[in-house]
């Protein structure tokens, strides 16, 4: 068992092309012995956004704080505390902060996301690998 | 993509033996098309607790509100908003509300949890199947 507080986990900048004002904490991952999926906490600054992209694995998301939108292709959906999102594999998506405080959300991915033969990497893997 | 608010998802009693004062919302699961893992939100009333048990799959947990403890066998760990927990496969564990308001936490399990040949079911599956 591993028990920890959010602020014990490093907050790292998201340095992916297309990301602005994004930081991430890898809360639970393979490094901790999690066998199937990883839990990350994203913090997007006011005006910030994640890359508009797609990849061959899903996201499961729970919004903790703030206000924003998730784009399903060109269609926006409102995000606020308590919103849950399933982004399906290969869907074009982007998260945007539309409020005046940080947009914070939990985002889970399968471990298979960073082991794919096509070299597709999960958001922030370049940061996590530094 | 599926986007929904927590209160759009049914809050169901947890009727497992050994559970007291527990309710659950299945936020994202196979029914929604999630291919690998399921996200549930548990609400444990003051004085309530989940079963003390173990099973051959992991939990990944994020505490949203309230105060409580998670038992790792006989060893308690404090829970409050922002605590994350990895319960490893086969670990004996129990969640208890030690505060005076609801203890709310997100708990994820792999989809394989309810397809095991040994018949082990995830928490609340008996409710979800009703």
Image (cartoon, coloured by chain):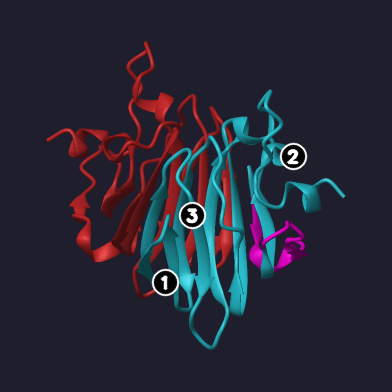
Chain colours: A cyan, B red
Query: Circle 2 marks a residue in which chain?
Result: A
User: Most extreme residue toward the top, as rendered?
Assistant: B117
x and y percent of residue B26 in the render? 29, 47
Q: Which residues are magenta?
A: A3-18
Between circles 2 and 3, the one closer to the viewer is 3
Separation (CA) of disc 2 from disc 3: 27 Å
The residue that disc 3 covers is A93
> What residue sits 62% from the left and 70% below the top?
A43
In the image, is residue A14 part of the stretch drawn in magenta? yes
Query: Circle 1 marks a residue in which chain?
Result: B
Q: Quadrant of the N terminus of chain A?
A: top right
| Label 2 and label 3 in one chain | yes
Disc 3 secondary structure class: strand
Q: Which of the labelled discs sits on residue A34, or is there none?
A: none
> What residue sits 42% from the left and 42% below the top?
A88
> What residue sits 36% from the left and 47% below the top?
B50
The residue that disc 1 covers is B99
Residue A101 or B96: which is nearer the viewer? Answer: A101
Disc 1 secondary structure class: loop
Q: Is residue B119 visible?
A: yes
In the image, is residue B112 part of the stretch drawn in magenta? no
Q: Counting other residues with Cα less than 10 Å from the Cα at mark 3, is it few (<14), some (14-19), or many (20 or more)? A: many
């Amino acid at each position: 068992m591993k028990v920890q507080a959010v602020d014990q986990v490093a907050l790292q900048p998201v340095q992916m092309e297309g990301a602005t004002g994004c930081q991430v904490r890898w809360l639970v991952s393979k490094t901790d012995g999690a066998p199937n999926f990883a839990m990350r906490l994203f913090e997007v600054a006011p005006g910030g956004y994640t890359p508009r992209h797609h990849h061959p694995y899903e996201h499961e998301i729970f919004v903790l704080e703030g206000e924003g939108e998730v784009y399903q292709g060109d269609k926006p959906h409102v995000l606020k505390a308590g919103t849950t999102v399933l982004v399906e594999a290969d869907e074009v998506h982007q998260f945007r902060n539309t409020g005046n405080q940080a947009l914070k959300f939990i985002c889970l991915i399968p471990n298979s996301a960073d082991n794919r033969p096509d070299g597709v990497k999960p958001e922030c893997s370049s940061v996590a690998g530094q």
